[in-house]
Image: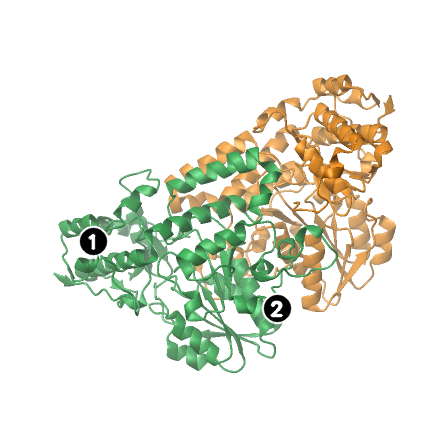
Chain colours: A orange, B green
Amino acid sequence: MLCLRVTLRRGEAVPPGYAEIVTTIRTDRGYAGELDAADQLAGFRDRFVRDDESLIYLDGNSLGPLPIATQSRIAEVVREEWGAGLVRSWAGWIELPRRAGDLIGQHLVGAAPGQVAVCDSTTINLYKLASAALDARPGRSVIVTDDDNFPTDRYVLAGIAAQRGCELRMIRTGMNDGVSEDALRAAVDERTAVVSLSHVAYRSGALADMAQITGIAHDAGALMLWDLCHSVGAVPVELDAAGADLAVGCTYKYVNAGPGAPAFLYVRSELQDSMRQPVWGWFGQRDQFAMGPGYDPAPGIERFLTGTPQIIGIAAVQEGARLLGEAGMGRLRAKGVALTELLIGLADEWLAPHGFTVASPRDSARRGAHVTLHHRDAWQLSQALIKAGIVGDYRTPDRLRLGPAPICTRFTDVWDALDALRRIAGDRSYAGLAAERGRVI
Amino acid sequence: MLCLRVTLRRGEAVPPGYAEIVTTIRTDRGYAGELDAADQLAGFRDRFVRDDESLIYLDGNSLGPLPIATQSRIAEVVREEWGAGLVRSWAGWIELPRRAGDLIGQHLVGAAPGQVAVCDSTTINLYKLASAALDARPGRSVIVTDDDNFPTDRYVLAGIAAQRGCELRMIRTGMNDGVSEDALRAAVDERTAVVSLSHVAYRSGALADMAQITGIAHDAGALMLWDLCHSVGAVPVELDAAGADLAVGCTYKYVNAGPGAPAFLYVRSELQDSMRQPVWGWFGQRDQFAMGPGYDPAPGIERFLTGTPQIIGIAAVQEGARLLGEAGMGRLRAKGVALTELLIGLADEWLAPHGFTVASPRDSARRGAHVTLHHRDAWQLSQALIKAGIVGDYRTPDRLRLGPAPICTRFTDVWDALDALRRIAGDRSYAGLAAERGRVI
């Protein structure tokens, strides 16, 4: 019998039906089955395409599975809107970046309408908004981020700093934790133009306190730019309430919109008309179809658009956001906490003797929806798991990352995965696998 | 009886089977039917989804129709690669930007392997390459383009110029013609870093002599950046042979890859390793999955990638490029010339008396695959055509643009469209339509 340390976010109520699972856990499979039986979200598993019933997929934090509704919707957009409607369908498509953005704002990131647009990739959106933030803070030339931020974030910010002769200030962060408030307070000053951090850390799953960190950035007079890739759809996000200025996020993880689906960006409404992004494309133009001589940025969130939007991808984003909205971020968060608590509890009990340590925050209030385990042979273990029909993922240098996406993962999936992992670790069957690392995404 | 002035590009042979149609045309519908009967590409019409047999679609230059193979391929990528393969499919997806790029290089733009990548949008790619070109020509601070270039090109270049304190020099170009070699020669000098022009002008359809214009840019020591949006898949493009440095292009027009499908970029192989683009994303990183601390651009074309590629869209690009490759750019060009010659001939005969003038080059060697007609009431006429089941498009300020995509348009479609237009113009039924312009794309 292990103690289950469910700590919900401040002020967050335990949803009805979950009260009984927040006390203790047992390590027998029957217990995981009981949790599944009590799971209010259990039915959502059937809303996804399942090709192989025996597969345990704990990588929805890398690429989310395919919702059945999305499969149908993509076919409809292709056949009816493109195939039959042809160019005439632009009458409706033209509004999709904003419409899909508003859906994300409403269901997933706590943003009133008109502040979110679906467009480009996370990388491009980060480039646009970080550049715009520097322009919006003239006289300041420091960008602050942390050294365990996701690679594309660090690279993009380094590129902007190099281009503009700015300083990129890196907060040192352990691989197991997020950025501490104290470290951020020490890093920002009157030269800081923008602070750019991930809400949930890609490696450890550490969850930042958005309101508090945004406040620290604001106290220094800086703008706050959040990367929501590993939090959107996994934990409740309240951009408006936290006073956030800017945010970007992807949709192919917990939003389940498919490989390379378009990303989104958020710009707080009061900031929009005073900000300008560097890529002056025709979809950001005020009177786009006048095709006039000079660039005059559109009022509102549209000025942050660039080229022609990816229509099929945006349709998939809409379906993904609707499905999460139907499940409700409160219930998804409660289940995410329970799933990761079970995972950590079983790891402590079964895997610690085999050289594993938990490399994610143990306080669920500081943790997103994935758990990372440290093990010297994490690469081979991740490959052995895949051979056993369990898909998690490897992260450098020695991490096994397991993401039981709340909308479609069973408690028994977590139990079975950890059970397999203890067998693989115990018989050392992984030891024969090549140590050379392949591609991981 | 009208003279059909088919003038192929220098050194371009008239493909077999077309010899008999390059002499004269008649204005009777039977003649158009004879051309269809002799059309070697006629069968390709059945490779596209047709929802409404009565619709005449002359707007493939804005959004190409849906190939049947693409519909199947998208369904397969969604169901099998995403739905069943899940994150494991990245093993193959990771190579798609280059693979699809090589297909475009081989079939459509005359580029040896390793020089084209499918990624982002035209707008973003133009931003990346124009910025990289400026960096590659230190000490030079002038960007040259023309005042009738496509809006997003002019805006993006203006944004870069504003950001960097460069001069954007605009060549004055009439709305009916492309940039003349003389005008370009007068515009470039030792301060010019990059010349950015469209190969086929979006409004007039004017086709530039790529080799000659590239040579003029090179003579001034500048890099040449081509926008191929209105030429790729419509006219033969020979980037390598022309000595072009850089190019971008879209895939949702003549490549038929669907609304908002990803664009492509070309960087001549000798230039790649010395160039750096401004958006330092993780897909441009040398050892991407090491996720290391610093950005180190990949060798080759991959350094021009940014964020996670749009997999579904790239699959559609592959299908589109293959289909055009099967038809062959030589045959597509010959048919494109014949279609536009017929269109111009009928316009001269039937529409000139109603106030229309041809606003595209009359010399087919200087014209892409679309024809633009000038008329004071072009907007209402375009709306009246749509009501009659004929989709072309309106372009500011007073142009009707008709694009008979060679791969799927019949000569009788052109005849019927022009016949409808002369009736609409003759009975002035369009005059009652609202003059207020709506959205056009």
Picture mark count: 2
Looking at the image, residue B113 sits to the left or right of residue A155; the answer is: left
Q: Is residue B235 left or right of residue B17?
A: right
The residue to which callout 1 is attached is B422
From this view, report whether residue A268 is shown above or below residue B301.
above
Residue A353: x, y in percent?
A: 87, 32
Callout 2 amino acid: Gln
- Seen from the viewer's position, the closer of residues A220 and A370 is A370
Q: Amino acid at mark 1?
A: Arg
Q: Chain of mark 1?
A: B
Element under disc 2? helix
Res A228 quadrant in image = top right
Question: On residue A279, which mark appears?
Answer: none
Residue B361 in percent (x, y) is at: 29, 67
Give the image location of residue B151, x and y in percent. Answer: 46, 62
Chain name for mark 2 = B
Give the vertical position of B423 relative to B366 (above or below): above
Which is nearer the eye, A157 or B287? Answer: B287
